[in-house]
Image (cartoon, grey):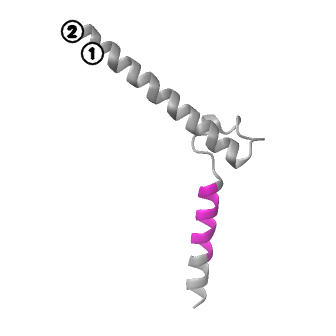
Amino acid sequence: MKQRHIQSFLMVSAAFFAMNAPIRAGNATSHVNASPAQQVAQMRAQMADARTTRQDASQADDDAQD
C-alpha cells in the first residue's frame, strides 16, 4: 500500500513539473515574467510565423520550377 502512494505521488509530481516546464530551453529566459496566457499567445505567434515562412518558401520554390 505504501509503495502505491509513493508511485502516485511521483506520477503527480512529474506531471506537475512537466506542465510548468518551458517547452524549449531557449525560451526559458523570455518567459520568466510572462503569464501562462501570454506564453501560449507567444508560442502560437511563433508557430504561425514559422508556418507562413514555410508556405512562402514553398510557393517561391513552386514558382521557380514553373
Comparing 47 with 6, the one in front is: 47
* Magenta stretch holds residue 4: no
In which image quadrant can residue 29 be found? Answer: top right
**Disc 1 marks which residue?**
62
**Disc 2 marks which residue?**
66
* Magenta stretch holds residue 12: yes
Amino acid bearing label 2: Asp
- x, y (%) of residue 13? 63, 67
* Residue farthest to the right, as pictured: 33
Please report the residue visible at 56 percent of the width from the left and 77 percent of the height from the top. 7
In which image quadrant can residue 59 be found? Answer: top left
- x, y (%) of residue 43? 58, 38
Q: Which residues are magenta?
A: 9-19
- x, y (%) of residue 17? 64, 59
Amino acid bearing label 1: Asp
Please report the residue visible at 69 percent of the width from the left and 42 percent of the height from the top. 38
What is the CA distance from the residue labelled 1 to the residue labelled 2? Answer: 7 Å
**Residue 5 appears left or right of 62:** right
**Circle 2 SS class:** loop
Comparing 1 with 52, the one in front is: 52
Category of crowding for the residue at label 2, using alpha-carbon neighbours closer than 10 angstroms: few (below 14), some (14–19), many (at least 20): few
Task: Look at the numbered discs 1 and 2 and tell me whether their residues touch, using CB distance below 8 Å.
Answer: yes
